Amino acid sequence: MAAHLHLHLHLLHIIRPGLPRNQGNSTMCFRIDRIVINENLIVLAVAGRITGEHIEILRGVMEQEMVPPVLDLQNVILVGSEAVKFLADIEAKGCELRNCPLYVREWITRERNFGAREK
């Protein structure tokens, strides 16, 4: 079995004005862990919330990879509409989305179908 190398790339705690700092981390955290399976397979495990403000960070991390990474969404707890559009777009371009929560998968499918009708 391939050895897994876990590298912590980003841990961002998004603190918004007016929100108490001690509110649960799961409501304010966006995290990407880079897992190297082998030289041709990189998994970016995303956790927490993915909102519009996180898309550019995620895109930047993905662009740093020599091979297209796989996104593991198992620990994603919430996505915003901009994030769903981003996920639908990258999946259509060949990015594999693993362990996608069912509600996110359904939303991506609706987004893809809606986008196809607009064209």
Image (cartoon, grey):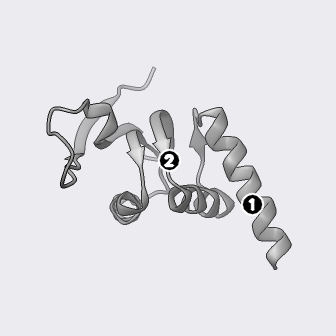
Estimate how packed mark 2 is, as few (under 14), some (14 to 19) or many (20 or more) residues with alpha carbons within 10 Å.
some
Q: Position of residue 76 (x, y in %)?
A: 46, 37
Locate residue 65: give its quadrant.
bottom left
Q: Is residue 55 above or below residue 78?
A: below
Q: Position of residue 95 (x, y in %)?
A: 59, 54
Q: CA distance from mark 2 to mark 1?
A: 16 Å
Locate residue 46: give its quadrant.
top left
The type of residue carrying mark 1 is: Arg
**Left or right: 48 with respect to 113?**
left
**Left or right: 99 with respect to 48?**
right
Residue placed under numbered mark 1 in the picture: 112
Q: Nearer the viewer, residue 111 or 59?
A: 111
What residue appears at the point 40 percent right and 59 percent down from the top-left corner? 62
**Left or right: 45 with respect to 84?**
left
Q: Nearer the viewer, residue 66 or 114?
A: 114
At numbered mark 1, what does the secondary structure look like: helix, strand or loop?
Answer: helix
Q: Which mark is residue 91?
A: none
Q: Is residue 34 above or below residue 2?
A: below
Residue placed under numbered mark 2 in the picture: 79
At numbered mark 2, what does the secondary structure look like: helix, strand or loop?
Answer: strand
Locate residue 54: give its quadrant.
bottom left
Q: Nearer the viewer, residue 7 or 88?
A: 88
Quadrant in the picture for the C terminus: bottom right
**Left or right: 40 with respect to 24?**
right
Estimate how packed mark 1 is, as few (under 14), some (14 to 19) or many (20 or more) residues with alpha carbons within 10 Å.
some
What residue appears at the point 22 percent right and 40 percent down from the top-left corner? 8
What residue appears at the point 21 percent right and 45 percent down from the top-left corner? 19
Q: Position of residue 52 (x, y in %)?
A: 42, 62
